[in-house]
Structures are given as structure tokens and as C-alpha cells.
């Protein structure tokens, strides 16, 4: 198809997308304490390190590259009484990127104390791999580790188990 023919399709698609995004945003509303706790528990269960029968998890470890998800998780930690000055942070990044710049970017973006950052983990470059996560917009992944968080991990397990139970009861 020609660009002129696709232009109308792209415009209609963009309008439909904007309308659905507005509809989704309107459904959210304000987040109360319960919302933030449940949201954080689900985020952790999706993206955080979990205990295995062969490896007991004694602390929360959350890794992601999305600043929005990381901000939501930090909000969850604050709701649980864990300040940004308690957790430690580390950047996972490819060696072809600017690791020091990434630390500064994450610290500024999420208002994190730079002194709480550990040494970045550098991934060696594999020339056979075609990576698209390069350039000025690439900041690696941020690892958030909460020390002495076994009880909080158990609380998350309880919240998730209850959510699963509720959903299971709704299907019955």
C-alpha cells in the first residue's frame, strides 16, 4: 500500500489508541494504602526473586529496566516502612554502555541516594548478538535489594496466596 493510503489508517489507529489510553487512565483513580500494598506485592511476585525449595530467599531483590515499575515498587517499600536510604541499588548493564552515567541517571530519575549504589555488574559484549537496547536511552537494569527483609517477603507471600485464593473462589 502507498503511504497516502496508510496515512488514514495510521491516523484512525492513533485516535483509537489515545481514546483507549484515556479510558484506561480514567479507570485508575487515586491509590490508597491497600492499593499500593497489593500493587507492590503483585509487582514483586512478577519481577522479584522468589524462594525455591533449593534456595531460600532471605531478602527482597527486585530487578527491572522500567523506571515506572521501579517507582511503583519503591512506593510499595515506603508503604511497608522501608526508606530509599535502607535499600541498596546496583546497575546491570552492557559493557558498551556508560555504567557511571546509568548510576547517575537512575539515582536522579528515582531520587535515590547515590551512596547506596554498589558496583555495577557489567555484561560482556557478544558481537554475534544484535542488541537494540543501545544508545543514550539505554540505562541497563536496576537491582533493588532490601536487607533483612525476610518478614516482608513472607508478608508478600501471604498477600499473593490470598489473592490467588480469592480468584479461585470467584471461579467456583
Image (tube, rainbow, N blue to C red):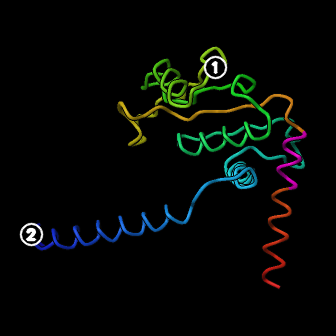
Label 1 belongs to which residue?
117
Name the quadrant containing residue 145: top right
* Mark 2 or 1, nearer chain start: 2
Q: Is residue 39 magenta?
A: no
**Residue 30 placed where, x, y %?**
61, 55
**Residue 32 placed where, x, y %?**
70, 52
SS label for mark 1: loop
Query: Is residue 115 toward the left or the right of residue 1 in the image?
Result: right
**Residue 87 placed where, x, y %?**
73, 27
Vertical comparison of 140 with 112: above or below: below
Whether pointer 2 and pointer 1 mark residues with C-beta atoms closer than 8 Å, the reply is no
Camera-side residue of 96 and 12: 12
- Which residue, as the protein is rendered here, is positioned at the far bottom? 172
Label 2 belongs to which residue?
4
Q: Quadrant of the C terminus?
A: bottom right
* Residue at 82% across, 35% down: 59
Query: Is residue 111 toward the left or the right of residue 96 in the image?
Result: right
Camera-side residue of 85 and 101: 85
Amino acid at each position: 500500500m502507498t503511504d497516502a493510503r496508510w496515512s488514514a489508517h495510521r491516523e484512525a489507529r492513533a485516535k483509537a489508541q489515545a481514546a483507549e489510553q484515556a479510558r484506561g487512565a480514567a479507570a485508575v483513580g487515586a491509590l490508597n494504602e491497600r492499593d499500593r500494598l497489593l500493587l507492590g506485592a503483585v509487582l514483586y511476585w512478577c519481577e522479584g526473586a522468589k524462594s525455591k525449595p533449593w534456595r531460600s530467599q532471605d531478602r527482597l531483590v527486585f530487578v527491572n529496566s522500567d523506571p515506572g515499575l521501579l517507582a511503583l515498587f519503591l512506593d510499595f517499600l515506603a508503604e511497608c516502612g522501608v526508606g530509599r536510604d535502607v535499600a541498596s541499588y546496583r546497575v546491570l548493564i552492557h559493557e558498551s554502555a556508560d555504567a557511571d552515567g546509568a548510576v547517575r541517571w537512575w539515582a536522579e530519575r528515582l531520587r535515590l541516594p547515590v551512596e547506596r549504589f554498589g558496583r555495577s555488574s557489567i555484561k560482556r559484549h557478544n558481537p554475534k548478538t544484535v542488541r537494540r537496547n543501545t544508545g543514550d536511552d539505554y540505562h541497563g537494569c536496576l537491582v533493588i535489594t532490601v536487607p533483612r527483609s525476610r518478614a516482608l517477603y513472607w508478608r508478600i507471600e501471604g498477600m499473593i496466596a490470598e489473592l490467588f485464593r480469592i480468584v479461585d473462589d470467584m471461579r467456583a
